[in-house]
């Protein structure tokens, strides 16, 4: 998660005026990115794999992938880290919290989406508009920016994949939002989500995300975990009630993450969230937004939570990024690994697509990647990675070799005693009798290396 704070790359400058004109160009010299079949390795501003109109398994690549740019990293990220000042200087951004600056960022973003050919975007309420001195002022700021956003969405055809409320940056949320021990803070979070949901409806958002960065604890000593979880469930119930009341049709998504910024977060991983939703009777109305960088932080394989969420019919959307395998924190890097992408796309194809969700690039360029071109190159590289991952996954599925091996591995549940177990018709007594009669099972190889070799064939 990067800088949401108004730290500035070039504080105090007001040289941004040339970007205030309606027809200002923010990325001069960068064309609309084309697909080029025979591009060489150093041609970076072209797609080499992502041909949006190519049809794979009955759908265009664009329809399968539903890419989205996130506003926070790409248009609010400054490259600041706990040890160093901002490094990313965007010429239109004077670092101020002014409305004029907020508008320039939004207009720069829509030029970026259009040149990249990405049809979706995502934002936090507080990324796009500054907080005012009180809730009424803050809402007014948001309304003003949303007007502009609405015009730009209409003009460009770019849609809002999801909106979310930033319930973690403001000091009032230091002890949590819906899990805060102070009910007054809970009320602030509720008021904020209420407004953001109205905005989401106005902008035709296809989903609405909840990420609980401060919903958790640093110490069990001062924490009543059961009350906090009950309150969080209550919060989600109110959000659902309000969604229905205003007729917002987007899917509600919860995004798991085990830690960072809080030591322990309640939405630890996919199975924890699924258990929570089932416990509080929310599993019919919420799905999951899975971010693989969070999955690996939870100690699982990259694709683990995508697989688990999908297995329970709850995979709603994906924040397609990656961590660094040799680091233990949330680096939000652009995904560049074909094998990882193919694992994810295999799940997406198998569940019949990710719509109304998508693949949101919750990714930031490294603080050392300071050129404006790097913003494009990073997205292009990740889009090509997922396009290739899609093609690999489609081949794996169409060939059916792996599926056949898996089917064979579980074939004992297809008839006889196995079929009875699977149907729920068997009992312990009957199974004991079965073992008495049939003795020890045969050793059956798990064939992990065989599966790995088959997958490598398609890479
Ligand atoms: C932080 C999360 C966050 C959510 C949206 O780690 O990834 O960015 O996606 O609040
Ligand atoms: Ca993250
Ligand atoms: Ca995310």
Image (cartoon, rainbow, N blue to C red):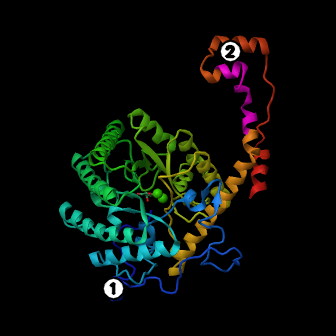
Q: Is mark 2 on a helix, strand or loop?
A: helix
Which quarter of the figure is the C terminus placed in? Answer: bottom right
Question: Which percent across, then down, holds residue 442?
Answer: 81, 26
Q: Is mark 1 on a helix, strand or loop?
A: loop
Tell whether 283 sits left or right of 176: right
Viewer-closest of 216 and 49: 49
Q: State whether residue 83 is above or below residue 62.
A: below
Query: What stretch of residues is rendered in magenta?
Result: 406-420
On residue 282, the disc is none
Instruction: State how far apart marks 2 and 1 are (Cα).
Output: 77 Å
Q: Does the magenta stretch include residue 307?
A: no
Question: Which percent across, then down, holds residue 259?
Answer: 46, 51
Q: Residues within 10 Å of mark 2 (few under 14, many from 20)?
A: few
Q: Residue at x 63, y 14 (%)?
A: 428
Which quarter of the figure is the N terminus placed in? Answer: bottom left
Question: Which percent across, then down, holds residue 84?
Answer: 45, 74
Viewer-closest of 36 and 11: 36
Q: Which residue is drawn at 78% across and 23% down?
A: 441
Viewer-closest of 290 and 11: 290
- The count of marks equals 2
Give the prevailing secondary structure in the magenta stretch.
helix
Q: In which quarter of the image is residue 450?
A: top right
Q: Mark 1 points at which residue?
A: 21
Q: State whether residue 324 is above or below residue 431.
A: below
Tell whether 383 sits left or right of 144: right
Tell whether 242 sits left or right of 3: left
Viewer-closest of 283 and 130: 283
Q: Mark 2 points at which residue?
A: 431
């Amino acid at each position: 998660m990067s800088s949401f704070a108004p730290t500035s790359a070039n504080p105090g400058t007001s040289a941004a005026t040339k970007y205030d004109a309606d027809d200002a160009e923010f990325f001069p010299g960068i064309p609309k990115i084309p697909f080029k079949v025979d591009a060489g390795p150093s041609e970076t501003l072209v797609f080499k794999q992502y041909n949006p109109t190519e049809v794979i398994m009955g759908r265009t690549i664009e329809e399968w992938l539903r890419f989205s740019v996130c506003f926070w990293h790409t248009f609010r990220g400054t490259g600041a880290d706990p040890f160093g000042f901002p490094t990313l200087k965007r010429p239109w951004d004077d670092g101020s919290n002014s409305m004029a600056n907020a508008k320039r960022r939004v207009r720069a973003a829509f030029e970026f989406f259009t040149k990249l050919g990405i049809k979706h975007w995502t934002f936090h309420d507080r990324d796009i508009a500054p907080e005012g001195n009180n809730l009424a002022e803050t809402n007014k700021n948001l309304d003003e920016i949303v007007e502009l956003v609405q015009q730009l969405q209409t003009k460009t055809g770019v849609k809002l994949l999801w909106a979310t409320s930033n319930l973690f940056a403001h000091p009032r949320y230091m002890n949590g939002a819906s899990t805060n021990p102070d009910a007054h803070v809970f009320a602030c979070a509720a008021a904020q989500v209420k407004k953001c949901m109205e905005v989401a409806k106005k902008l035709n958002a296809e989903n609405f995300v909840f990420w609980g960065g401060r919903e958790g604890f640093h110490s069990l000593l001062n924490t009543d975990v059961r009350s906090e979880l009950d309150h969080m469930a209550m919060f989600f119930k109110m959000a659902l009630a309000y969604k229905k009341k205003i007729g917002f049709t987007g899917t509600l998504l919860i995004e798991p993450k085990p830690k960072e910024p809080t030591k322990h977060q309640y939405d630890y991983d996919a199975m924890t969230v699924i258990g929570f939703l089932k416990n509080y009777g929310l599993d019919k109305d919420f799905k999951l937004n899975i971010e693989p960088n969070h999955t690996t932080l939870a100690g699982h394989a990259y694709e683990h939570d995508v697989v688990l969420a999908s297995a329970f019919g709850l995979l709603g959307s994906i924040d397609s990024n990656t961590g660094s395998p040799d680091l233990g924190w949330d680096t939000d890097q652009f995904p560049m690994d074909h094998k990882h992408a193919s694992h994810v796309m295999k799940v997406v194809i198998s569940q019949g697509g990710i719509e109304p969700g998508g693949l949101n690039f919750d990714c930031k360029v490294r603080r050392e990647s300071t050129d404006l071109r790097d913003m494009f190159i990073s997205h292009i590289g990740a889009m090509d990675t997922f396009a290739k991952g899609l093609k690999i996954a489609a081949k794996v599925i169409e060939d059916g070799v792996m599926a056949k091996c898996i089917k064979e591995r579980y074939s004992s549940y297809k008839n006889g005693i196995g079929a009875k177990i699977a149907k729920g018709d068997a009992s312990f007594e009957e199974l004991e009798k079965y073992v008495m009669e049939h003795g020890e099972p045969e050793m059956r190889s798990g064939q992990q290396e065989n599966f790995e070799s088959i997958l490598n064939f398609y890479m």
